[in-house]
Image (cartoon, rainbow, N blue to C red):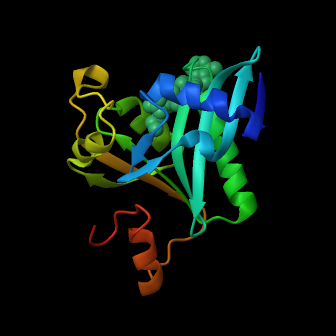
Amino acid sequence: MTRSTIQDTDRESIAEFVAAHWGCPLIVTYGQCFYPHQEQGFIERREGRIVGLLTYRVHDDQMHLLTLNSTVEGTGIGTSLILQALETARTQGWRRIWLTTTNDNVRALGFYQRLGFRLVAVHPGAIDEARKLKPQIPEIGLHDIPIRDELVLELWLKPYLPAPAQHAATCADGSGRGTP
Ligand SMILES: CC(C)(COP(=O)(O)OP(=O)(O)OC[C@H]1O[C@@H](n2cnc3c(N)ncnc32)[C@H](O)[C@@H]1OP(=O)(O)O)[C@@H](O)C(=O)NCCC(=O)NCCS
């Protein structure tokens, strides 16, 4: 198994991988559209095939995880990609890692919380809105649960200091603190 950071030569295969796992190369998170193959991230390969992918974007010293996928679940790929992201964020001095997932994804909810993430916000109906931008989002998800809401999870690498200026910045970045 080999892990590497995303290079320009990987972008076409990442777009195909994302389309295979998320319905098309576009993802919608926190009301914004992203093409993960255009972003930064890490790829795990086995015999030349992608078996794990994590993509992210950095803004305001915060790492927004856009996608995480493992094609061989339960063998440690997802954990090692998150640990790689944590190491990168710490090395770069970023303050916070955050992500969104959907209300049906109870496995991911357990997975992230066991790795130290906290559930900090629920946005009821956010996926109903996202579906208007990306009709490929299924109506029914894992365990036959209707997919409707977005959950925000975060992990602070530096202490959260709720000074007024920072408070406004973090609200815009998915913290869920204060008025949405
Ligand atoms: C969520 C996801 C990325 C986890 O990836 P994964 O490769 O299965 O993750 P890991 O193998 O590191 O860990 C998964 C579980 O297997 C266990 N595990 C880790 N290594 C293991 C091993 N060698 N043998 C057996 N189990 C192991 C972990 O304890 C973990 O348990 P938990 O989920 O109950 O906490 C994966 O399920 C996935 O791709 N899901 C679809 C996409 C998705 O939902 N992405 C996240 C939302 S954005």
Q: Residue at x 71, y 51 (%)?
A: 87
Q: Quadrant of the C terminus?
A: bottom left
Q: Position of residue 10 (x, y in %)?
A: 71, 33
Relative to 119, is 92 on the left or the right? Answer: right
* Residue 31 percent location from the top left of the image: 35, 53
Residue in the foreground of this view, choosing between 45 and 132: 132
- For residue 7, say whether it is visible: no
Name the outermost residue toward the bottom.
164
Question: Taking the image as drawn, is residue 128 in sight?
Answer: yes
Q: Nearer the viewer, residue 141 or 10?
A: 10
Residue extending furthest top?
A: 47
* Residue 156 relative to residue 173: left or right: right
Q: Nearer the viewer, residue 132 or 99?
A: 132
Q: Residue at the spot x=34%, y=63% of the render?
A: 176
Please report the residue visible at 32 percent of the width from the left and 32 percent of the height from the top.
Answer: 137
Splitting the image into 4 quarters, where does residue 27 fall?
top left
- Residue 85 vs 45, above or below: the answer is below
Residue found at x 21% / y 49%: 124
Q: Is residue 109 left or right of residue 37?
A: left
Q: Quadrant of the N terminus?
A: top right
